[in-house]
Image (tube, grey):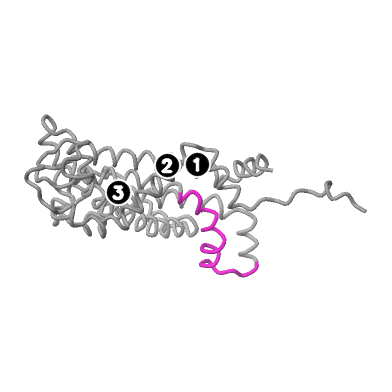
Amino acid sequence: MADVSLAPPRPRSTLRIVLSSLLRDKFALAAAVFLTLVLICAIFGPWLLAEQARALNLKGRNMPPFSLEAGWMFILGGDALGRSLLARIVVASQNTLLIAGSAVMLSLVVGGFLGLVAGYRGGWIGAVLLRLADAIMSFPSMLLAVIVLFVFEPGVTNVILVLAISRIPIFMRTVRAEVLELKSRMFVTAARAMGAKTNRILLLHIAPMILPTIINLAALEMAFVMLVESGLSFLGIGIQPPEVTWGLMVADGRNYLGSAWWLAFWPGLAIMLVAMSLNLLTNWLRIVTDPVERWRLETEAR
């Protein structure tokens, strides 16, 4: 009878390997937990705390933080109209993440599609798309957004569009560079020899190979777009009241920095923590999605 103890160990699933690597990386784990908490606040916060975020309490004007005289909702203090800063930060998370996520997703889809076309087709089509990307990148993102929003009415839709347009060249040039390297691979040549059409090659063979790089780039761009949107709101040409974002809260609190620093500190801290968490999680994603690093993780996990 064969010795059962000599049987080779069963390979672990990819999901378990990824989760174990996340648990070993304490910074990435903390970033993932924090971003999950922020996402939950963005989804359910406006539904649960909308009334508290709008309720005026003149007795609590510029109430200092960690004072529970008006209840636990004022643990972060009150603003110039006596509204709970905690409730407003939670409610503002929805608009902040919605604008950043929508802008990144729109630029990812459009820039990714244009990058696939420019990299695979090449020729005059690729040259025209590259010159268009160079023209957009010649303007700094903040300057381009300031000019467009100064001409047009500031609003959620316009802010999303201008931020998305400014980031399209980043995705397009990244995807084009990946496609130029992948289209000469053997699997693409084999698919072309078997009669696969261009659309099938791009969507089923090349796009999945580029996806890890795009996901990492999108996470980084999410943090950058959040900072740009906050800067626009700080300048007064971003989201306008009665809508609220973290950047707008920082702008409202700048007039009280000498007497009520917490009005700008807490929303600014939220922006910094989300941006830092996205960068930490991106570093972990880069390791997990890299084939060489993933092979090393699988070897260590066995």
Magenta residue span: 194-215
**Which residue carries the number 1 mark?**
284
Q: Main SS type for the magenta part?
A: helix
**Mark 1, other Cα within 10 Å: few <14 / some 14–19 / many ≥20:** some
Q: Amino acid at mark 3?
A: Ala
Disc 1 + disc 3, Cβ < 8 Å: no
In the rendered view, does 219 fall on the left or right side of 251?
A: right
**Which residue carries the number 2 mark?**
31
Q: Quadrant of residue 300?
A: top right
Which of the two residues, 262 or 172, is positioned nearer the viewer here? Answer: 262
At 14% across and 32% down in the image, what residue appears? 257
Estimate the x, y position of residue 245 in percent, counting from the top left: 22, 49
**For the residues marked 1 and 3, what is the alpha-carbon distance in whole angstroms?**
33 Å
Q: Amino acid at mark 2?
A: Ala
Task: Tell me the element at label 3.
Answer: helix
At 22% across and 36% down in the image, what residue appears? 66
Disc 3 + disc 2, Cβ < 8 Å: no
Estimate the x, y position of residue 111 in percent, counting from the top left: 38, 56
Which of the two residues, 13 or 75, is positioned nearer the viewer here? Answer: 75
In the rendered view, does 107 fall on the left or right side of 50?
A: right
Q: Amino acid at mark 1?
A: Trp
Disc 1 + disc 2, Cβ < 8 Å: yes
Q: Earlier in the sequence, mark 1 or mark 2?
A: 2
At 15% across and 48% down in the image, what residue appears? 237
Q: Quadrant of residue 112?
A: bottom left
**Which residue carries the number 3 mark?**
135
Q: In the current view of this chain or complex, which residue is farthest to the left?
A: 58
Q: Quadrant of the C terminus?
A: top right
Q: Which disc number belongs to residue 179?
A: none
At 58% across and 52% down in the image, what residue appears? 15
